[in-house]
Amino acid sequence: MQQRFNLMEDAPESFKVLLALEMSVRKSGLEPRLAHLIKIRASQINGCAYCVDMHVRDARAAGLPTQWIDLMSVWQESPLYDERERAVLGFVDEVTNVAATRIGDAAYGAMTDHFSVQEIAKILVAIGMINVWNRMSLAQRLMHPIDEVRSAA
């Protein structure tokens, strides 16, 4: 695949607005572990290899457990995630798949068991932001770096 265009160069004012919102999310006080969880899970759902690669690398660099990162795509089947993380993962799934889910009451209710309305609002903005980045990356056809290709032994 070849990159189609470069949003940063071809629409710099719009890119600055996206960066400003990203900085707002980063400064919101959202727990770093939850921020990583949101970015990885939404990127998995959206099929954005560029973003999955970036956010998995970031999570590993932050010291998050490899197994916790690796099993996120099948979080419902794994006991690794605590109830708060499971609530956020369910909410990420609902919000990211909004056309199909309509963001049901069960997912929101699970969030209210663990978070204040203000915390839910911050989480929702973080989910929205990564969904925007995923769509921008996919539309541009951004390619993740390839470290090395190894053959199976």
Image: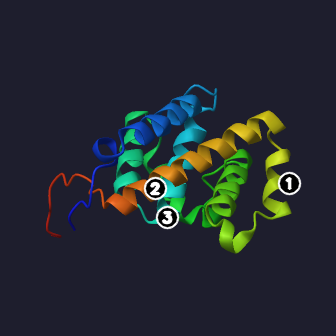
The residue where tag 2 is placed is 134
Q: Nearer the viewer, mark 2 or mark 1?
A: 2
Which sits earlier in the primary sequence, circle 2 or circle 1? 1
The residue where tag 1 is placed is 109
Query: How far apart, in angstroms, are the residues tagged by discs 3 and 1?
Result: 24 Å
* Amino acid type of the residue that numbered disc 2 sits on in the rendered structure: Asn
From the top left corner, tell me how far across and down residue 25 is, in percent: 58, 33
Which sits earlier in the primary sequence, circle 3 or circle 1? 3
Q: Are marks 2 and 3 in contact (CB under 8 Å)?
A: yes
The crowd level at tag 3 (other Cα within 10 Å; few <14, some 14-19, many 20+) is some
* Amino acid type of the residue that numbered disc 1 sits on in the rendered structure: Gly
The answer, for residue 86, to whether it is visible in the render is yes
From the top left corner, tell me how far across and down residue 85 is, in percent: 67, 48
**Which quarter of the figure has residue 94?**
bottom right
Residue at 75%, 35% in the rendered image: 119
From the top left corner, tell me how far across and down residue 129 is, in percent: 55, 46
